Structure formats: structure tokens, C-alpha cells
Image (tube, coloured by chain):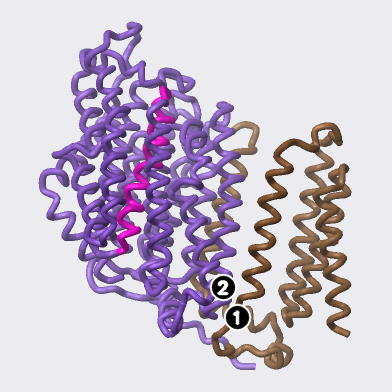
Amino acid sequence: METLFFLIITLVAIVSALLVVTCKNPINSALALVMTFFCLATYYVMLDAPFMAAVQVMVYAGAIMVLIVFTIMLLNIRVDATKRHSHKVVLGSIIGFFTLVNTAFIIMRSRVAMPNGPLTGEMIRQQGHTELIGREMFTTFLLPFEITSILLLVAIIGAVILAKKKL
Amino acid sequence: MDMITIPAVNMTPILPEIFLSVLAMALLLINVFIPSGQKSYLGYISFVGVVAAGVLVGAGWGAPVESFSGSVVQDNFATFFKIIFLLSAGLAILISDQYMEREGCNHGELYPLILFTVVGMMLMAAGTDLMTIFLGLEVMSVALYVLAGFNRANLKSNEAGLKYFLLGSFSTGFLLYGMALTYGATGTTRIAKIAAIVGQMTVPSANIMLVAGMLLMLTGFAFKVAAAPFHMWTPDVYEGAPTPMTAFMSAGPKAAGFAALLRIFLVALPTLQVEWSQLLWVLAVLTMTVGNITALRQDNIKRMLAYSSIAHAGYALVGFAAGNGTGAAGILFYMLSYTFMNIGAFAVIILIGKKGEANGTVMDFAGLGFKQPALAVAMSVFLFSLAGIPPTAGFIGKFYLFSSAVQKGYIWLAVIGVLNSAASVYYYLRVMVYMYMKEPTEDFEWTRITPPIALSLLISVAGTLIPGIVPSVILQFAEQAVKLI
């Protein structure tokens, strides 16, 4: 049952990902991207990571997609169908194909040799994924968590400097 | 549900980072109250702040202190690199003022951004967790993207910012993917634990997930240090970015990339050294050769120094490929001297240049030797050092790097390095030929040398000559610094 579900989701994910790059209208591409994000969220649920799934939907399918759609609409991008194919498509396809083969090879050959960590699916269901992540964030990864605030501050300053009309 | 016990946190190791972050935020607030003509005061404050941070960093020299349950450490390795970052930031602040005034983009936000870049670089050098290193790198990069595009009225600067941002984000993807795979293969992001787990593997190179992770991390960092074939962004970004920021990003962030690379590869993955050593061999040869050969044909001086900075990353990679103590100490020494000589050269370029990035070609140096002898002598010192001619720091650094390759048995790598170094003499000396042997093409007014830029030139000349004449002092520090990894 789970395998069948996985296969269906994967099919949808691949088709919508392909639509993102093949659609001529950017709005359609954006909507296909939302679909891909939802499929990814489904994967997280299947991997016992419900918190990640929720974040994926809220942040990516929600906030970021709204921004992308807003930008497309504000910029009023014209559909330019004539210049869509250039000689770089061939080169890109070749590189893409080899990357795909390479990735597949790595995944097939990869074995996780390490002993399992303390987190099991059972434990996640008992304690709650959100709590476990929060616990790690404020103990093991306290410093990286704090650095994130600086990162966001720098990004805000940068956006203001580059975009403000008059400084 | 039990309470979360927040681990005991020792703030001392990240005191300089905290100090600089607070200072940067304070400067952002002060900036609001300073009228637009007098933003230089922010520069003076931040320069004093950088010096103060240098004192804080220097006080940490000695036994390593870990903090935040092993995600950051204060050891001599990090301290040495932090000094390099602070020097590059301090010199960049000194040379910014005049240029930014001339180009009409002396916005107060410049200085906080430089300080935040330093915070990011410091975390990269001090981080002992892949997460800390990654976030440090992102803080550094995001600030640098903005600094590259800081001259908003200039199209080339816009191009530099956007190009750096797009390609940089792309390379970050590689880096993060590599870190994720390494985490998948070892189950931890702590560098010490990765080292322990990889050390237990009988044949670590058979663990293909780990090898893939290593390769992707190498790609991500190779982009940041501008190693070929990941160097495509360098000339455009270095040319378009405001000159003081070009000087800054060619020195500090390059050193930061090497700091993180050295820590990850020498501490976490020493058992894979046979594999990564060969890769770095190829990478070093490619980087040196591409950088030097392309630099031969450049007339724009900023572009020329951009290609030259690629070549210099290649020289440092020679020491990295050797992967022994001499090589690592050589990289530390070289990054320090490169900071002085490169920022010094850019300071002279700023003085030669005129509004709107005019006067940016090698030909514009014609007759400098007669009009401004002191400036020409300073430039000659920097160029000699970049070319690796004794008695400058550049010579000692290269000597150390190449001798580490010989020690390791990579004779050909050293030979290729020396040949490259010889080829580079052509384009460095070409500038000197113009300075001393050509008549000035036009009789333009020379920009006056303001005290801050004069100070930066003095520091740079001293920093280029003193380690070249008495290298042992700094080399001792560098050797002590790499002893811990």
C-alpha cells in the first residue's frame, strides 16, 4: 500500500517538475512548482518527519510561492516562445543526463554502515517531531541557531540597500 | 515531558564575533543620525572596532577552548585566520572612504556589512561543526553579494552583485548537498565525530556516499576560493565590484574558504587523503595555469588582478595538495602576506582611478614613477611580492608552498608551480614598465592621498616587506597554528 502511494506521488512529482521547466507561461510553471513542493512534503510525512512536511508546505508552497507569483505578476513577464531553444539545450541535456546517471549510481551503491542513532520512528511518534527538533535546536545546535538570526539581519540590510529608491 | 537543559555555554571563544556583531548593529543605529556627507565617521569607528576585536582575538592565542558543546572552538588555527580576516577588513575600511566618496555611494551601511562579513568568516574558521561552518559561510556570502553590488548607480557593479549572488547560491547548493551526504554517511555533523567514525572505517574510500559528500564539499569551497574550473564568476565580479570591496573579497573570503577546507579535510577526512590529494593536484595545476595564462592578456588592471587572484588560489592549493604540516603552515603564511600585498595593490589602483571607474587600465599607470615616486615604489613592492621575487613575503610564501609539495614527493607539481610563477612575472612587471619607462599619456590631476589610505599603504608595505625579510617569526606562529589540526 505504502509502495503504491509512494509510486503515485513520485509520478506526480516528476511530471510536475517537468512541467515547471517546460511550461511556456511562467504562472503555470509556478503552479507546477507548488505541486512539486506538495509532493516533497508528502515524502517527509512518509519519512516520519511531519514537522518538516508542515514547514515545507507553509514556507515553500506558501510563503515563497506567493512571492514568486507576486513577482511574476508585478514584472508582467511576457511569454517569449521564440527564443526558448538554443544550442545550450543540447549541452545542458548531456550534462544533466550524466548527472542523473551519476546520482543514480551513488544512490544504488550507498550503504549506511553506521549504527542507528537514538531517534526511531517509534520515538518520533511518541515524543513528537516538533519537540525533538526544538530540543536539538536549543542544545546541540544552539550556536548555529543563533547565527541564523545574524544571517537574516544581513539579508534584510542587503535587500534594503539594493532595493531602496533613495538611500 | 522533561525540561530542556540548555548546555553550559562558554562565551569566551566567540567573544570577538559577539563584539563585532554588536558593533555592526550599533553602527546601523548610529548611521541614522549621521548626515549623509559625514559617513566617514562610521568608518573610523569600525576601524577602531576592528582593532579592538584584534586585541580580543589575540588574547585567545594558546590552548584550545571548545564551546557550545563542540560546535565552535578557539584554537590557534582559528586565531591566526581571524587575524587575517581582521587585517583584510581593517585595510578595506581604510581604503573605502575616499573611493566611496568619489563614486557617490558612501552609504553608512557599508561598514556594518563589512563587519558582518568578518563575523561570518570568523565562524567559518572557528566552526567545528558543519552547520556552524555553513552558516558562517552564508553570513559571509550574503554580505559579500551586497557589497559587490554596493555601487547601485553603476551597471557593472549591479552585474557583479547579481552574478555573484546567482552563481554563489548555486555553489552553496553543492556545498550543502555535500554536507548532507557526509552527514548521511557518518550520522553526525561534528567534525571531531566525523573524524572518529571515518577513522573506524576499514576502507573509507569504498563508502561512496562519503566520497560523494567530500567531492561536493570540495566543489562548494573551490568556488568560494575561486579555483578553476569554478572560477568563471571571478573576473566579472572583481571588475564590477567597488574597488575596495574587490580588495576585501580577494583576501578575506579566500582565506576563509581555505580555513574551512583545511579544517574539514585535514581533521575530518585525513584517512581519505590519498583520494583528495590527487584531486587537489589536478585542481592546483588547472587553477594556476588558467589564472596566469588568462591574466597575460588583460589590460584592465582589476581584471588582471582577478585572474592573478585565481592563480594565487592555485599556489595555495599546491600546499593543500601536499597536505602536510609545511603545506598547511605555508597556506596560512601565504594568505596573510597575500592580504597585505593584494589590498596594497588595490589601494594604489583606487588612487590612480577617477570617478566612474575610469583610468582602470594598465596603460593609465604610465609615468607614475615620475609623478608620484613614493606611490610607484609602494606599487612595485606589491607587484614584486605578487610575482614572488625576494625579499618579499610573496617569495617566502611560495617557497614554503612549493617545498611542501617537494617534501610530499609531488616534484612535478612544484615544477609547474615555479613555471607558472615565472610566467606571472610578465604581467606584473608590465605594470612596472608602464610606471617607469613610459611617458604619461595625459596630464591629469592626481588624486590626493588621504591619511586613511596612506596608513593602509604603510601597513601593506610593512606587511609585505617585514615577513619577507624576517619570515621566521610569522612562520613560527603559522606552524604553531597548524599543529593542532
**Residue type (three-letter) at the residue carrying disc 1:** Arg
**Residue type (three-letter) at the residue carrying disc 2:** Met
| Chain A colour as displayed | brown
Q: Chain of mark 2?
A: B
What is the x, y in percent for residue A123?
Answer: 68, 92
Circles 1, 2 touching at the beta carbon (< 8 Å): yes
Q: Is residue A150 left or right of residue B261?
A: right
Q: Is residue B211 left or right of residue B268?
A: right
Highlighted magenta segment, given as a residue range: B298-323
Which residue bears the numbered disc 2?
Answer: B209
Q: Main secondary structure of the magenta part?
A: helix
Label 1 and label 2: CA atoms lie apart by 8 Å
Q: Residue at x 47, y 74 (%)?
A: B205
In the rendered image, the vertical position of residue A65 relative to residue B176, given as above or below: above
| Chain B colour as displayed | purple
Q: Residue at x 52, y 86 (%)?
A: B5
Which residue bears the numbered disc 1?
Answer: A111
Q: Residue at x 78, y 78 (%)?
A: A45
